[in-house]
Amino acid sequence: MVGSFVRGALLLAFAGAAALPVGANSLLDYVGQCVPFARAASGVQIYGDAWTWWKQAEGRYPRGHRPKVGAVLAFAKTARLPLGHVLVISRVVEPRVAMVTHANWSRINGVRGGVEQDVTVFDVSAAGDWTRVKVWYRDSQGLGGSEYPTHGFIYGPRPAAGLSGKSPDYVGSLIDAYAR
């Protein structure tokens, strides 16, 4: 435990970035819940269940309904997501399609908690305000059939380096979003 703390402190001191979640050598190596990942990836220093982030951000961070790289999209609490979910925008493809990097969504090698980089999120809200989305799901190899209510975007002070890969699949992202 102490070794992980010291390693994290050294990485923070040298990189000047948000602290990595305990046990991670890089953001993409992290395995765990979405909240510590989103905090490290976005610089948004909010704690507690993901569904509480929107209200906690009020007066502390700018909020809105347009995706920007490094912004946190805060999901509402639902029966399927009793703790909500938070993810971080890694690329904006077009006004209703973005790529995200997040933790603990799909099963990776049969296990939840891993980080997925540059996966598609599609705004399916009637008003185009990102209050309902579909998220790419590894098990179905495409956008899942479920729509999830969201509160909106929390704009943090700085995104971490490495949120997006070197060659994200923009075309695949658009196909995921618009092919039905």
Image (spheres, grey):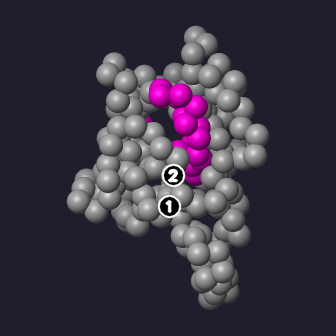
Type of amino acid under label 1: Arg
Q: Secondary structure at mark 1?
A: loop
Look at the picture and state if 171 lies above or below 59: above
Does the stretch in magenta take in 98?
A: yes
Label number found at residue 158: 1
Type of amino acid under label 2: Gly
Q: Secondary structure at mark 2?
A: loop
Does the stretch in magenta take in 89?
A: yes
The x and y percentages for residue 148 are 41, 32
Look at the picture and state if 60 lies above or below 66: below
Hey, which quadrant is residue 80 in on the image? top left
Q: Residue at x 65, y 19 (%)?
A: 175
Hey, which quadrant is residue 64 in on the image? top left
Q: Residue at x 47, y 64 (%)?
A: 43
Magenta residue span: 80-105
Label number found at residue 98: none
Q: How many marks?
A: 2
- Main SS of the magenta part reads strand
Q: Are marks 1 and 2 in contact (CB under 8 Å)?
A: yes
| Mark 1 and mark 2: Cα distance apart in space | 7 Å
* Left or right of 154 on screen, residue 105: right
- Would you say residue 149 is visible in this rendering? no
The x and y percentages for residue 77 are 33, 43
- Would you say residue 27 is visible in this rendering? yes
Q: Residues within 10 Å of mark 2 (few under 14, many from 20)?
A: many
Which residue is at the far top?
Answer: 180
The x and y percentages for residue 144 are 55, 26
Label number found at residue 70: 2
